[in-house]
Amino acid sequence: PDFWGRLNPRWSHCSKGQRQSPIDIDTSVILYDPHLSEIKIDGDNPYQIVSIFFITKQLKGELVNTGRGISLLIEKSFSNPSDKSVIFSGGPLSYQYTLSNITLHFGRENDRGSEHTIDGKRFPGELQLLAYNSQLYKDWSEAKRKPNGLAAIAIFIMISRASNPLKVSGSNEKYSLYSSQQQQQQQQQQQQHSNSGLKLITNFLKNITTRGLSHSIDFLSIFDLMPSSYKHYITYDGSLTQPACHETIRWIILNKPIYLSSHHFHMLRHLLKGDGHQDNYRPIQPRNRRLIRSNIIKESFAQKIRQVGDNINNPKIILILIIIIVTIMAVIMIITPLRRHRERERERERKVIFRVL
């Protein structure tokens, strides 16, 4: 990755760009933006009835061994070609973005694998949902070179701490990445279960062990890959993390992770054959004073707000506030007549001077 810009002139952004990704998310410089709304995920399709008890939106795609990692290239949702794909909108996005591919990053060991980091901390994996601006551009190839062309939702992957075959849904996450240390420790002690969408993908790895092989996936819900909540996130402007590193992408990093078992991480590292499958993430790039926004109120700040609210209800605080208000009003009542008296005296002096002249 450090030499991508030298290998091909068309990849010059990889070495000379000023808005490259991934970056380290320094939480001390995050700007809280209350106007960042929740991200909308919509397939623009009627719900497909899979069984009497289960209703969901489905994705179709080709799971491909790229030689450096694995990607799920998305086709049309459902079997009907007239149906549209999954659409991302809202939040920091000004347009609608159509999901194009899903990429998985992981490392040689459990202490690394994610491309982005939080305060220097790397996570075992990162799932990236890459989409193109389908309102302005016809496809991914055109959009990736254009302004506002791309959007990506990044989801950190952590090692699950429980294996329960009866609970494999990706909606059991209680861990927040951007929270107090005490809250993180409490959340880590709770049992977590492997994400059902990731389990489905990794179970097909045996069919794509070498570069160039692919396997069709017809039964995958986008919501099976998502955490229980995607309301809170961090966002910044950056680039693709693979050549040609176009700087046309709005990154959305979700605050809640998803989970995968150690067994499935082992499958990722050993079933796939290739030099890039052990550490297939790009090194951290300089932030270069880019703005990082979030709609997350950090725990310390929220706690201060709660403390202020509690103090206002304290009888002693109320008494002190009353005394201060009464004192201010008394001072105003004393000062106001004095000012008026001085103004009258000055007016009289001006009249006397006028008569003498």
Image: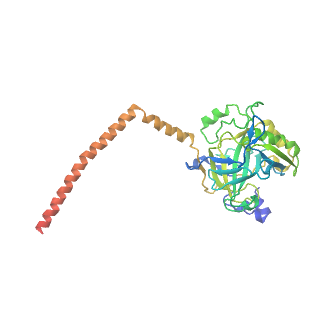
Above/below status of 100 relative to 190: below
Q: Return the residue nearer the eye: 99 or 12.
A: 99
Q: Is residue 156 visible?
A: yes
Q: Does the rendering let one see residue 286? A: no
Residue drawn where x is 50% and y is 37% of the image: 306
Dividing the picture into quarters, in which one does residue 53 lie?
A: top right
Residue lying at the far left of the rendered structure: 356
Q: From the viewer's perspective, is residue 53 above or below residue 226?
A: above
Q: Quadrant of residue 146?
A: bottom right
Q: Quadrant of residue 108?
A: top right
Q: How is the image coloured?
A: rainbow
The N terminus: image quadrant: bottom right
Residue 143: percent from left, percent from top = 72, 60
Residue pictured at 36% horizontal, 36% vertical: 320
Q: Where's the C terminus, which quadrant?
A: bottom left
- Observer-nearest residue: 303 or 112? 303
Percent position (x, y) of residue 119? Answer: 64, 46
Residue in the foreground of this view, choosing between 132 and 313: 132
Q: Is residue 226 left or right of residue 200?
A: left
